[in-house]
Image (cartoon, grey):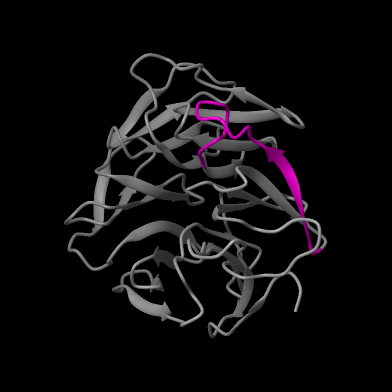
């Protein structure tokens, strides 16, 4: 996953469809990440690029060229590193970028041979290492904080979403036809948490910092909830959800990206702990 998370469940923020905004809008949001100052960065596939929500307003953070092969033209995920700098994964250039300066994405692996294929999610451990879920290679890569040649951290089938807990245990949601949720120890040992096929099309995973795991399921239009030692239960299954994708908990709030492929713009919802939805930006 793309962000370390924590806090108790209080509000849920969902990024979805048909929101009328002023200067900027969500077009096809895939993944949210929250900075220490509360700014919300969102990977937006159809911008293409990254937008940021600050004080209730959506602004462009980086706009990619509409040319295949240009940096972040096919952005899939966004995160914050241990120094608060924005990270983003791009399947077009098969690369992970860091914004050392505004508007200037710096490639971290520089196309290392045999490295990252399809970066779908990013998480950062307590040492600043950048963990990348590679859907193509069926692997989790570890990139040094400063960048460099990726090192294989773990073999996980079809990883598409990640979150990391306070013990540096990595939770990975998978599109495997059988096992769909894994936990990876700091030394790379892989354990299946959900060993049977339960989710229709899982996209991402988030942690609330109190032992509860949340999984987004696009085809089922559902957010699943998994308490410690329990079984996944449907938590939000609302007719307003179109295709819940990226997740991230922060200070008691869950961010959920919900793009609508049939609409030009997307929406941000808030939901309380009971799952009641309301817009994040606007009314």
Depth check: 167 or 68 in front?
68
**Residue 5 drawn at (x, y percent):** 57, 55
| Image vertical order of residue 48 relative to residue 10, above or below | above
**Residue 250 drawn at (x, y percent):** 63, 60
**Residue 85 drawn at (x, y percent):** 69, 36
Q: Is residue 229 visible?
A: yes
Residue lying at 55% horizontally and 21% vertically, measured from the top left: 147
| Image vertical order of residue 104 relative to residue 63, above or below | above
Residue lying at 34% horizontally and 68% vertically, measured from the top left: 219
Residue lying at 74% horizontally and 46% vertically, measured from the top left: 60
Indicate yes or no whether the magenta region holds residue 216. Answer: no
Q: Is residue 33 left or right of residue 1?
A: right
Q: Is residue 135 left or right of residue 278?
A: left
Depth check: 234 or 107 in front?
107
Indicate yes or no whether the magenta region holds residue 69. Answer: yes
Q: Considering the image in quadrants, where does the C terminus appear?
A: bottom right
Q: Magenta residues?
A: 56-75
The quadrant in which residue 100 appears is top right
**Residue 170 drawn at (x, y percent):** 41, 46
Q: Main secondary structure of the magenta part?
A: loop
The quadrant in which residue 280 appears is bottom right
Depth check: 194 or 44 in front?
44
Q: Is residue 39 visible?
A: no
């Amino acid at each position: 996953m793309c962000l370390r998370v924590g806090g108790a469940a209080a509000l849920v923020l969902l990024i979805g469809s048909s929101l009328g905004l002023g200067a900027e809008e969500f077009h096809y949001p895939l993944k949210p990440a929250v900075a220490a100052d509360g700014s919300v960065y969102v990977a937006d596939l159809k911008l293409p690029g990254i937008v940021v929500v600050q004080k209730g307003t959506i602004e462009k953070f980086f706009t990619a060229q509409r040319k295949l092969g240009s940096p972040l033209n096919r952005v899939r995920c966004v995160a914050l590193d241990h120094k608060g700098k924005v990270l983003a994964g791009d399947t077009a250039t098969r690369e992970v970028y860091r914004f050392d300066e505004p508007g200037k994405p710096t490639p971290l692996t520089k196309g290392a041979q045999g490295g990252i294929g399809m970066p779908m999610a990013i998480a950062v451990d307590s040492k600043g290492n950048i963990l990348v879920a590679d859907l193509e290679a069926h692997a989790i890569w570890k990139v040094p904080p400063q960048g460099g040649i990726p090192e294989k951290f773990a073999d996980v089938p079809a990883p598409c979403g990640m979150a990391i807990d306070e013990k540096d245990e990595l939770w990975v949601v998978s599109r495997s036809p059988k096992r769909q949720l894994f936990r990876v120890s700091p030394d790379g040992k892989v354990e299946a948490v959900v060993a049977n096929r339960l989710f229709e099309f899982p996209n991402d995973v988030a942690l609330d910092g109190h032992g509860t795991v949340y999984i987004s399921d696009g085809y089922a239009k559902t957010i699943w909830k998994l308490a410690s030692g329990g079984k996944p239960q449907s938590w939000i299954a609302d007719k307003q959800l179109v295709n819940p994708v990226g997740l991230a908990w922060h200070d008691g709030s869950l961010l959920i990206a919900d793009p609508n492929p049939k609409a030009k713009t997307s929406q941000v919802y808030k939901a309380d702990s009971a799952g009641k939805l309301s817009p994040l930006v606007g009314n």
